[in-house]
Amino acid sequence: MSALNALMGRGIIPPVVHGVLDYPLAAILIVGPLVLSFDDSAAKWIAFVFGIGAAVLAVGTAWPTGIVRVIPPLLHGYADIIVTVALIVLPFVIGFSDHTTALVFYLVVGVGGLGATLATRFEPQATGERDMMLRMAA
């Protein structure tokens, strides 16, 4: 697993940029199905659930853009990979691939999110967080 962790730490996108992008992603996942009038209720509800999950990750991740800062960045990265792959695969597995709007939405958000996740430099802890932990331990 440490090789995978090392790979996750080599991206070109800094954590703060990824953290900023998490908030509009959550909004897109929550509002997109309503604005685009998804015909399939499964497509709509799955996007809502993933949007709420994205909001929780955005608020809870321990990097500068997080508010609560309890989720380790690497865990955030692994969750992002799982969810973005799910966004790409679910239209075909659940059966709403014939709903063009939902299919395109899921593929665009999934591929874009996966690309951003794989390009992000997930650090085990932000330097400020590490320093704060050391001060609290002393």
Image (cartoon, rainbow, N blue to C red):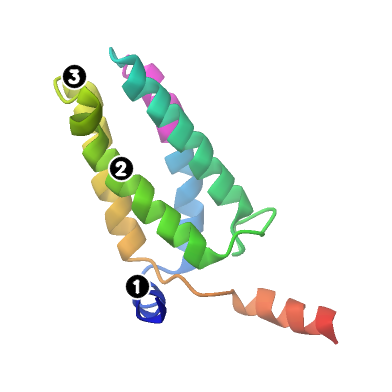
Q: Which residue is mark 1?
A: 11
User: Where's residue 100, x and y in %?
Assistant: 16, 22
- For marks 3 and 1, the one nearer the N-term is 1
Q: Which residue is mark 2?
A: 86
Residue type beneath disc 1 = Gly
In the image, 24 versus 11, the foreground residue is 11
Q: Residue at x 26, y 35 (%)?
A: 90
Would residue 40 be seen by someone viewing this image from the given angle?
yes
- Is the magenta region chiefly helix, strand or loop? helix
- For marks 3 and 2, the one nearer the N-term is 2
**Is residue 46 found inside the magenta-colored segment of the image?**
no
Q: Where 124 sits versus 36, above or below?
A: below
Residue type beneath disc 3 = His
Q: Where 113 sits versus 101, above or below?
A: below
Tag on residue 108?
none
Q: Residue at x 25, y 25 (%)?
A: 102
Q: Which residue is the extreme one toward the left?
A: 98
Residue type beneath disc 2 = Ala
